[in-house]
Amino acid sequence: MNKQSGVFPNNLFILKLVFRICPGRIAAEFLLKAIGYTAWVFYSIVLVKYVLHAIETGQSFGEIALFITGSALFFGTCNWFEQWVETSYKPKTDALLFEKLNGQLYDKAAQVELACYEDAEFYNRYTMAVKETETRASSVLETTADTVCAVIAGIGVMVNMYMIDHWVILFVLSPFVGKFLFGSMHNRLLYARDQESVSHRRKLDYVNRVVYLQDYAKEIRMSGIFRVLKKTYEEGYSGINTVVRRFAPRVAGVHFWQNIFTFLVIFQGVLLYSLYRTMVSRTLEVSEFAVLTSAMVSASWILIGLSESLIKVFQNSLYIENLRGFLSYEIKMKDNPEGPAPAKPVQSLELNRVSFTYPGASTPVLRDISIRIEGSEKIALVGHNGAGKTTLVKLLMRLYDPNHGQLLLNGRDIRDYRLGSYRALFGTAFQDFRIFAMTVAENVLMRQPVTAADYHCVRDALVKSGVYDKVASLPKGIDTVLTREFDEDGAVLSGGEYQKIAVARAFAKEFEIAVFDEPSSALDPVAEYGIYQSMLAACQGKPVFFISHRLSMATLADRIYMLENGTVIETGTHDQLMALNGKYADMFRKQAEKYAEEVGA
Ligand SMILES: Nc1ncnc2c1ncn2[C@@H]1O[C@H](COP(=O)(O)OP(=O)(O)OP(=O)(O)O)[C@@H](O)[C@H]1O
């Protein structure tokens, strides 16, 4: 990801992408620039030369006027074309490019392993790549077309100047030095400044997001967290300020020299030099003086434009590096696209001496875990907070790969299977579920419902999770949009009702293995019991893993694994563990006593 690809390949990468999406846009951009530079050269050199020559050779006013009117008509038509491209064609194609490029970024983001979201460098690159997509693609197009056309126009103007005076084109180098040398130094400084600010900017973005999202609104109002958020915001803001202040003297110095070389040297230099040849050494005609000074102004602006474009080419390249780095990021969790799809139904699932440490962490979260589940066993994972239960099911679903040991499905290492078909085996419900600002049906199916069977499946799943009556009472039933993010008529449900909708996702899916990670944390005891009954009924003949802190639910399991500090400390049926009288039995009794107290109170 840190390999530098080079300016040319980076810009070419974007051009190829754009060419695949919208080749007409490249042609339009080149045509626009060609028209612009042609007009420039025409008015500053060709027209001046023609008029002076026509006057000297005694052409009639009518002939000169015809030439000028013809050229005005030609450039007027070009101007109409420019307007159309700028106001109609470009905004349309910009939106298309943005949609397609962002689509690629989102596809990649959905594929990279979860560990990437915990890697700050990766996250910075991702946010910069997404932030820049909208502007960079059109900037690359513009600068490439500008560079090519400016080179051609610059050569044309310089040849004209060279024909009048061989030495005068030496002055032309100065804007190049100014813009290109000092300008690229300037941009490198700005880029370094941006890079250093990115972690501070992320703090600002985070606070912006938290303050804006409804999910946090309640806690912000009911606690002192807003002050902490404000402090985080101020830290981010002052971090950016510190970086800007540190870079300011260097940025100002480089900018000063850039202006001297870009404007002063060429404008005053060529004027003095041509005046000397016209007035003192008398080696230049007044008409040549006029053409030369007019060409000098043109050449300066063309070269300034060219060096600006070249700087932008380099600047774009730095940002494209992020985009390419992200898009070409080699996913560490290896898929085996040629591998088999797992055979159904699942015969066995086994963790064989599995250990796991989160990327960047030093202590293992799971150590030497061995679990074997056969046929349709129902397994409960229990233990105190942080024991490693959720991590274990994340390994089961291959969201992470273990550092040591193996996971075997039907006796075969799960890494041998196609990742997509392996993950498709699972029906899941998590404690940290998310509800999307979409319809109930889409939230349950996790895709658009198309057929009558889809709608039937959604209804059935909602009945099983115990929330159908509530959904049916909403004005648009299962087509009601959840949350008011985009829809003023969107439904706002209770935490438990949302959770039941999330659980319905598992019921709506044709799965082979069920994983329920505390799917009932927001439910009252009656609803919890009901949902567990439904879950186990829906999973008849299929293996189930469930995590629950309420050990009364664990009694429904065929086998219980009690975890502590990442290891299995007790295993057996509920009766066996109670008879063992170990930590499970202790925890169970304490929960039962607490429940009795609450009921008695
Ligand atoms: N993404 C992560 N990166 C680093 N450490 C993590 C990550 N996720 C969890 N951990 C650590 O792994 C340990 C086990 O977490 P895990 O979520 O598996 O526990 P759990 O038994 O499911 O807890 P709970 O009952 O509270 O849900 C915790 O100490 C946690 O700090």
Image (tube, rainbow, N blue to C red):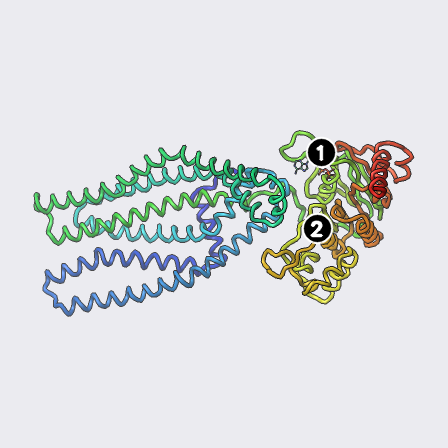
Residue 330: tell me if it is visible: yes
Q: Height in image: 259 above or below 446?
A: above
Of mark 1 and mark 2, the one earlier in the sequence is 1
**Type of the residue with mark 2:** Gly
Q: Quadrant of residue 256?
A: top left
Residue 285 got which mark? none
Split into quadrants, the picture shows ligand 1 in the one at top right
Q: Height in image: 239 above or below 437?
A: above
Q: Decide which of 382, 306 is in the foreground and name it.
A: 382
Residue 365 got which mark? 1
Q: Position of residue 327 (x, y in %)?
A: 54, 46
Q: Position of residue 484 (x, y in %)?
A: 61, 57
Position of 136 with respect to 360 (left or right) is: left
Residue 505: tell me if it is visible: no
Q: Position of residue 412 (x, y in %)?
A: 77, 43
Q: Position of residue 260 (x, y in %)?
A: 26, 39
Q: State whether label 1 is within 8 Å of ligand 1.
A: yes
Check disc 1 and report its element: helix, strand or loop.
Answer: loop
Q: Decide which of 534, 446 is in the foreground and name it.
A: 534
| Residue pictured at 14% horizontal, 46% vertical | 274
Position of 109 with respect to 542 (left or right) is: left
Which residue was labeled with disc 2?
A: 495
Check disc 2 and report its element: helix, strand or loop.
Answer: helix
